[in-house]
């Protein structure tokens, strides 16, 4: 069944159109990679899916689990299982990371009609998830992302994902800023979270990440349009030939 | 942007949760102030002659003084002759037991979320509840008395411990200190008195709940806390008031005295009626709070969470007289709608090696105007003294304002004062991040604001911190769409 269906999506920021008609279908259990040059609209697409208010959808449709995603508030999307790992995670001074996650998880559980987790159950869940992404427990009691290094922030995003267990995870350049070892452990974490019940969209510039998290599909986004889609080999070809190759191909194809 | 516009509008929509009126018949003086009224108040309280004289002297001072105009707040002129200066619940109130308290009053406390019974039996907090100028319930007094601690209403202290009251009354805030202190000294109705004898550590938090009730009654509380050599006490003060159309003046005076090696921690959560969303009504809170570190190594610490009142004019201060004494001020001040706050502190370093710390967190929303005003003064003989000040302002929306007026005067070369200030807007990015994790906008704002105030909440006693966070939550309820 199709989990996410993006149809002819146009979106603009400050009156300027960035996405010019995106089509994308993600089925449950799949991993999709979106690649593309700087400024092509990858984060914009991620932001539109997560419900960032600055992005105005001018045309098109997004269905998530058959429902109109664009009608939902960002928090409702999150509670329905949409998760965005931010390209630039936000600092929330003074707010303890585990306190934040407890509130988030319980908001999601409440939405699903599940009982809220008490402090003890939550703590044991947290400890188990820190192991999954090999995160030092000291990060639990630090304010959310405050003073975290770039790589630590990215790891914390995946930690959030591990705790919240989304149905659709969108990872926006989670690999950038991670050192080689971190990239490996974080990827392993993502792989462990992968299942038949969820799907992942990975936004990245580098084929390297896709060696660790092997995608089912690769899409190339250029100037607000998906110009090419294919299997994991497409990423390898891109790495060799660069984006100009796709640009040229598109031109020829027209 | 869109979110912030919503913030402003929703803030304006938020209703005051604790707005209700209890109808206990009051017997009170007619409106207006003259020497006869003062004599009436004093007679009603069966006060000794010296106290009446002190009141009258204060009144004569007050008549010669002018209302201060320097605070960064605006309000129409106050008609002091329209104010009722004394009112008391009619029922007789020498109660031994909580079961003797008027059930209507207990229901009122329940609505306010003050579980008096629970506090008595579970939490171990001694409560001296001031209801309309007269104390109606005092608990745990006996237990405290065994330790030699006196904790009672001010009126009772005047009757039972006149020498102590006479010795310390006005010793920190002189009757002619400022306009509102002089007025209070003339007409103060009641309040709390607390005396911790030499070497005693008060085993529980002492707390007082103030409440303004009968219409048009100005409240003029008087609090005096004396900590003798080597003693320690933590005192909590919290309040909320019912909905009113007319502005109500509140001019309290709080005096703290710490002798050698004594420590006083004074915490306040203030949530008086702030006025409606157009800025009508609300309490004028013009308070003088000052502590005197009279002895060596003494320490006075003020912590306040101010969310209520239409206008707040309040500078809990410390006179650092004893060598090595320490003064602290931790403050959260929230203004919303048309609330105005001009608050801060004064640290006066007089003794050697004295230290002071100031942490002020101002939150402005709606059309609120929030000013921090601080004076750090290091006198010539206050050698090797230190001050650290940090003033942070958080803006929610763009119709509100934050202002800081820090004054620093260092009159010797070995002392140092450090001042840091920041102003930030609550970030749309932060709110979006929280929402993306499943939190409602309301919870997001609440969380961000509480995080901003964390350093101050840390200073509050545990239960009070929880209450303060809840209060902030109530103030921020429905704040962003
Ligand atoms: N708030 C904004 N105001 C104006 N332009 C914006 C805004 N947000 C995004 N843009 C523009 O939209 C385009 C797409 O940006 P986006 O962040 O989606 O690119 P990206 O593909 O994620 O790039 P990168 O690989 O560098 O992360 C860019 O040209 C960017 O400058
Ligand atoms: Mg991007």
Image (cartoon, helix red, strand yellow):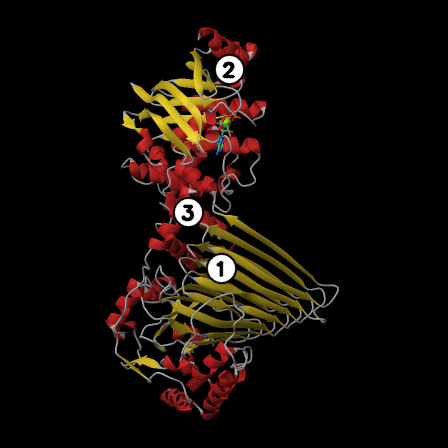
Classed neighbour count for the residue bearing mark 3: other residues with Cα under 10 Å, few (<14), some (14–19), many (≥20): many
Q: Where is residue B36 in the image (x, y as percent from the top left)?
A: 39, 91
In the rendered view, tell whether residue A183 sits above or below residue B294.
Answer: above
Mark number, residue B297:
none
Q: Is B145 rendered above or below residue B328? A: below
Q: Which residue does the image show at 35% across and 83% down from the upper left?
A: B31
Q: Mark 1 points at which residue?
A: B370
* Badge count: 3
Q: Nearer the viewer, mark 3 or mark 2?
A: 3
Question: For mark 2, what is the residue?
Answer: A211
Res B445 label: 3
Name above or below for residue B141 compared with residue A122.
Answer: below
The residue nearer to you, when weighing B27 against B37, is B37
Chain where mark 3 sits:
B
Q: Distance between the residues labelled 1 and 3?
A: 19 Å
Q: Which of marks 1 and 3 is nearer the N terminus?
A: 1
SS category of the residue bearing label 3? helix
Q: Are marks 1 and 3 on the same chain?
A: yes
Q: Position of residue B142 (x, y in %)?
A: 39, 75
The kind of secondary structure element at disc 2 is helix
Looking at the picture, how far across and down is residue B298, in whole percent? 60, 69
């Amino acid at each position: 069944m199709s989990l996410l269906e993006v149809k002819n999506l146009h979106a603009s920021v400050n009156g300027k159109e960035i996405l010019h008609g995106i089509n994308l279908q993600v089925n449950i259990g799949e991993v999709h990679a979106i690649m593309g040059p700087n400024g092509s609209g990858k984060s914009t697409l991620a932001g539109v899916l997560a419900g960032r208010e600055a992005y105005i959808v001018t045309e098109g449709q997004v269905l998530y689990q058959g429902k109109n995603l664009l009608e939902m508030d960002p928090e409702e999307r999150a509670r329905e299982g949409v998760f965005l790992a931010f390209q630039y995670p936000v600092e929330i001074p003074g707010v303890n990371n585990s306190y934040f996650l407890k509130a988030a998880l319980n908001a999601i559980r409440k939405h699903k009609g599940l009982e809220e987790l008490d402090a003890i159950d939550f703590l044991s869940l947290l400890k188990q998830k820190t192991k999954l992404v090999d995160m030092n427990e000291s990060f639990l009691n630090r304010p959310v992302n405050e003073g975290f290094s770039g790589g630590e922030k990215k790891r914390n995003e995946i930690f959030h994902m591990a705790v919240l267990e989304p149905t659709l995870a969108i990872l926006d350049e989670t690999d950038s800023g991670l050192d080689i070892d971190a990239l490996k452990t974080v990827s392993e974490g993502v792989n462990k979270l992968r299942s038949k019940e969820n799907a992942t969209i990975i936004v990245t510039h580098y084929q390297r990440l896709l060696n660790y998290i092997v995608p089912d599909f690769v899409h190339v986004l250029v100037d607000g349009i998906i110009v090419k889609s294919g299997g994991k080999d497409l990423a390898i070809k891109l790495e060799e030939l660069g984006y100009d190759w796709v640009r040229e191909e598109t031109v020829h194809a027209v | 942007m869109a979110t912030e516009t919503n913030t402003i509008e929703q803030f304006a929509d938020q209703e005051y949760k604790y707005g209700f009126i209890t109808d206990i018949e009051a017997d009170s003086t007619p409106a207006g102030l003259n020497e006869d009224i003062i004599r009436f108040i004093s007679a009603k309280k069966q006060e000794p002659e010296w106290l009446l004289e002190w009141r009258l002297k204060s009144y004569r001072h007050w008549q010669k003084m002018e209302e201060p105009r320097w605070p960064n707040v605006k309000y129409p002129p106050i008609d002091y002759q329209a104010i009722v200066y004394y009112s008391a619940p009619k029922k007789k109130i020498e109660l031994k037991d909580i079961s003797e308290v008027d059930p209507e009053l207990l229901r009122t406390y329940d609505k306010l979320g003050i579980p008096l019974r629970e506090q008595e039996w579970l939490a171990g907090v001694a409560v001296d509840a001031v209801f309309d100028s007269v104390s109606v319930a005092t608990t745990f007094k006996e237990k405290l008395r065994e330790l030699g601690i006196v904790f009672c209403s001010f009126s009772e202290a005047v009757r039972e411990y006149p020498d102590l009251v006479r010795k310390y009354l006005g010793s920190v805030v002189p009757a002619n200190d400022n306009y509102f202190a002089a007025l209070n000294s003339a007409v103060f109705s009641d309040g709390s008195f607390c005396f911790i004898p030499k070497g005693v550590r008060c085993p529980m938090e002492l707390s007082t709940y103030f409440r303004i009730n009968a219409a048009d009654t100005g409240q003029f509380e008087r609090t005096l806390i004396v900590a003798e050599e080597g003693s320690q006490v933590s005192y909590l003060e919290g309040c909320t008031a019912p909905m009113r159309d007319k502005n109500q003046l509140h001019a309290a005076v709080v005096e703290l005295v710490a002798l050698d090696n004594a420590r006083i921690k004074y915490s306040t959560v203030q949530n008086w009626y702030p006025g409606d969303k157009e800025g009508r009504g609300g309490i004028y809170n013009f308070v003088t709070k000052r502590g005197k570190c009279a002895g060596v190594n003494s320490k006075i610490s003020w912590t306040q969470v101010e969310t209520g009142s239409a206008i707040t004019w309040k500078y809990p201060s410390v006179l650092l007289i004893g060598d090595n004494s320490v003064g602290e001020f931790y403050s959260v001040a929230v203004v919303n709608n048309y609330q105005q706050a001009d608050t801060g502190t004064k640290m006066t370093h007089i003794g050697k090696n004295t230290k002071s710390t100031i942490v002020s967190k101002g939150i402005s929303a709606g059309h609120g105007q929030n000013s921090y005003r601080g004076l750090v003064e290091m006198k010539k003989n206050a050698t090797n003294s230190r001050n650290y000040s940090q003033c942070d302002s958080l803006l929610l929306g763009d119709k509100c304002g934050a202002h800081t007026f820090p004054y620093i005067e260092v009159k010797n070369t070995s002392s140092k004062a450090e001042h840091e200030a920041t102003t930030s807007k609550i970030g749309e990015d932060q709110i979006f991040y929280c929402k993306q994790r499943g939190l409602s906008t309301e919870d997001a704002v609440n969380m961000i604001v509480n995080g901003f105030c964390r350093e101050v909440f840390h200073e509050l006693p545990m239960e009070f911190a929880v209450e303060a966070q809840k209060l902030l939550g109530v103030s921020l309820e429905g704040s962003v769409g």
